[in-house]
Image (cartoon, helix red, strand yellow):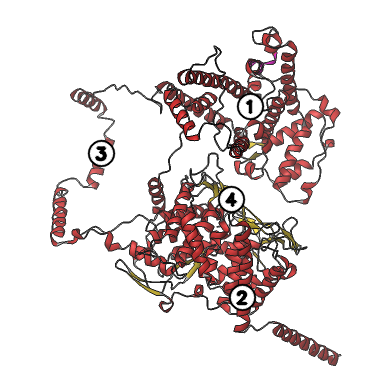
Amino acid sequence: MKKVAKNLYIIVTLCTLLSLATQGAAQKHYSATRKLELREDVRRMFQHAYDGYLRYAGNYDELRPLTCDGQDTWGSYSLTLIDALDTLATMGNFSEFRRVHTLLVEKMNFNRDINVSVFETNIRIVGGLLSAHLLSRRAGIDVEPGWPCTGPLLRMAEDVARRLLPAFDTSTGMPYGTVNLRYGVPSGETPITCTAGVGTFLVEFGTLSRLTGNSIYEEVALQAIYALWERRSPIGLFGNHIDVQSGRWTAIDSGIGAGVDSLFEYLVKGAILLNRPELMELFAEARAPIDKYMRKEDWYVWVGMNKGHVTLPVFQSLESFWPGILSIVGDTEPALRTMMRYISVWKKYGFLPEFFNIPAGEASPNREVYPLRPELIESAMYLYRSTKNQYLLELGEHMLETIEFSAKTRCGYATIRNVVTHEKENRMESFFLAETTKYLYLLFDENNFLHNDGDDRHGELLDTEENVCVVQAGAYIFNTEAHPMDMSAVHCCHNYKEDIFAQLDVSSFTGKALFEHSRKQRVAAQENWKPDCHPSKDTASFAASFEQSTSNTNEPERDRDKGRSAQATPSFTTAVDIEVFDEYQQPAADMLVKYFERIREERELNRTQQNLAVARNQLTVSDLDEFFGQRRESFASVEDTLQFVLNFMSNFTMDVAFIRGLQLYDGNISTVLGVAAQKDYESKMRSLWQLYVLEQQLTINVQLIRRLGLDIVPPPIDGDMLRNFLAIILENLNQSLDELQTLPANSTLNQTLNSSDVQLIRNAIDVARIDYVLAMRNTTAMQEFVHRIYLHGTNEEQATQQFLPLLSVAELGKLLTTPLKPAEEQELFKYTRRIVDFRKRMSETVDRLQTIMQDLGTTNTDSTSPPTTSGNPSPVPVAMPPVAISETATAKHHRHRQRQQPHQPQQPPQAQLQDQDNQQAKAPDVGSVWSQFVQNILRKTTVQRVKFDESVLLEKTRKALEKHAHKQLSYELFSCRRPQYIESFAYRDYYPEAM
């Protein structure tokens, strides 16, 4: 037996050794020649995609590689051309770099009326222009004197960044997600932004500030990061989406992937690039809860930001950047272990799916797409630079082969729609040329200049009259779009533009100035000197306590002294008349008083509602399980069943964050009632019963508006008939049920419509009222509402099961209904009343507008047209209001037809414009017709665009950053110590006063 065991042990040992030997033999050895061959393969891949973009989609943002055409995606500014520019320099194609550089300088203009993503525009456009500017000298561009601190691409990058600055003008300092390049933040823009969209600006904006000397860019980027940092959860985690105005988290899942990833990346890279060790401290502090709650067997999962419980056990392809970041901070062992996990997924499919379900070991349904992302290749490049492990080169070769085999098309490389079937999708994102090919190229090109470590032997001495420094030495820090920033050039400009001695007033340090300053200090000390006989603080406090102890006995004397003092020093009161005017110089005092009264009434109402508000009792899953565990047999009668449901819904509350997070509100309601309905629904904490009642009110109003045909634009009646129809609706809505029964059918308003039409209106209102009353007793509808909360708020499998109604339809019919009170009826139809009133005023305004236009047209015709032979006046066309946003398709088609028919007798365009100017000059000064139209609709003055003030934003940002002024740390990130003022660059400059 022992002999068998011994032989078995020998066999197992031999198998183990054989397996290890096989693995060692399987790992390839890459010679310098082989790495150069793979590098050239990557170059050919890039060139094929780049040539296809130039040929088929040069005027668009992106190439569509299956149909070989282009499409605009992020801003319609030739995105791929800018994004790929520094990749040309990376691969040594300097001639094409110079051609595109010239093209951008001569033709690119960002003063355009387009809405763009602040995040994407920053990392792709601002980052791409900055990196191209820093690489322009190496590429053979004849740079301007003063480069790298000046240049055309630098000015272009600052122009784009300045157009993004209005997004940062929020109450928290965190930016909006969208901005209009010409007009700033669009009206009605949502304040909800992902975490990465807030914290991914420091590399680009910091570089821009250091190159230009304008500190506002770095400061707003810093403030955005600190604003996020202040709002971490108690366990140190970040959510996924946040309201940039209120600072409330709207998505509380926490991870290192989509929506959060580049925040951590920029803490590390910003610390290195800008020599800010405090940012590295923040990263270390943020990493600790990540490892504690998210790291599971070298995977990283998604957890709840408040408790750290696992909410989504998936691996996202965007998380692949994490091993690269760990290698930058020198923690290569856990980076390699996590990298092996990610590589196993790549080898399983040949690509990385967007979501990989870790427990199931397969790609998540509907998330099998791979848009040629670079994150895994990026980490492989960083880890190879750190460890020289050639297995990473083997991974790079495998990636190159699978992309070349499965994604290549006739004119480019396509997104993989499904990593299982390798089906293609008709899109090639710009980051394929900006990142994926660049990182692959750098993986195999070990001597590329972007690998320079900042040694002076790699750089070039720049000696000008203004400055002497070393440039092009590196080290290069990549932004999240793989655009490299040259640290040597950044600090060269910063040292020059932020010279502390240039900021000081040298005359303050002359001997005469120092003597005068000392004399003023002595005079001030003499003026503030007090003799020792004056009472000290202790004496004064004793006297005060003594006076307080004798206050009761000296009260009459004190009153008499007070009266004499009042007589001795009479007070004067001056009455001042203040006139208040609005922006049109119209008296506004009455309106101001009205607003004050409304604010006072609302404040009193809020106090009353707070007193009547239900106590906070947050709903939990166990409460829902208990609720749906009840059966009809548990209750003696239908009334007891109803009472149980009402008590349950009245007892538990929902916070605003939960109401919004669970997405209970039906967005289709806003298409009928407007966005005000959603604001009301998600405005405050409510009990389940209050939410149910409000939801039924919204539903009833939507049904009533559709029954009355008010959701049709325009309604199927016009003119006076429309206004009378709306007035009758308002009259019936404002009356209670009892009052409607006594209202005569032949009232003044009713005479304008048939009695059958009036009855239809009343019937529609009655049906809506009855539906609402029945809903207040419908326990099944209440159960459905609670079950919807259950479905949205839990991942439990039992939540998907159908509930059993507590009462049957017959039993529901036995419940007694309670008539509505007049106040309840007024509250019930308030949304319909608002819509009807708006339509009525709209109709009145349209008629008034037509009258104004006809009057203006008649006046202009009489004053400008020559007398006609006939006695009949020419008809006056009814002018339409100008199109506020863009030209209509009909107008474009008409203009195109005019170009095709040049021989038609038409007045020359210049003559037409001159006639229009003359007519406008002769028209009476009645103001803009369009402004009158808007004012009549809204019944208020025209909203003026608030001009963005950069200086105000800078002052506000600096004020917010004062509390974050970092303490002096015991180390620096660079071996060569920099002046102390560099560390305080992004804060208000406090220079020492002369002695």
Tag 2 residue: 40
Q: Are marks 4 and 1 in contact (CB under 8 Å)?
A: no
Crowding around mark 2 (Cα neighbors within 10 Å: few <14, some 14 to 19, many 20+) is: some
First-in-chain label (4 vs 3): 4
Say if the magenta span includes residue 727: yes
Tag 1 residue: 831
Residue 950, image x, y percentages: 40, 47
**SS type, badge 2:** helix
Q: Is residue 420 left or right of residue 174?
A: right
* Residue 241 image label: 4
Tag 3 residue: 546
For the N terminus, give its image quadrant. Answer: bottom right
First-in-chain label (3 vs 1): 3
**SS type, badge 4:** strand
**SS type, badge 1:** helix
Alpha carbon separation for disc pair 2 and 1: 67 Å
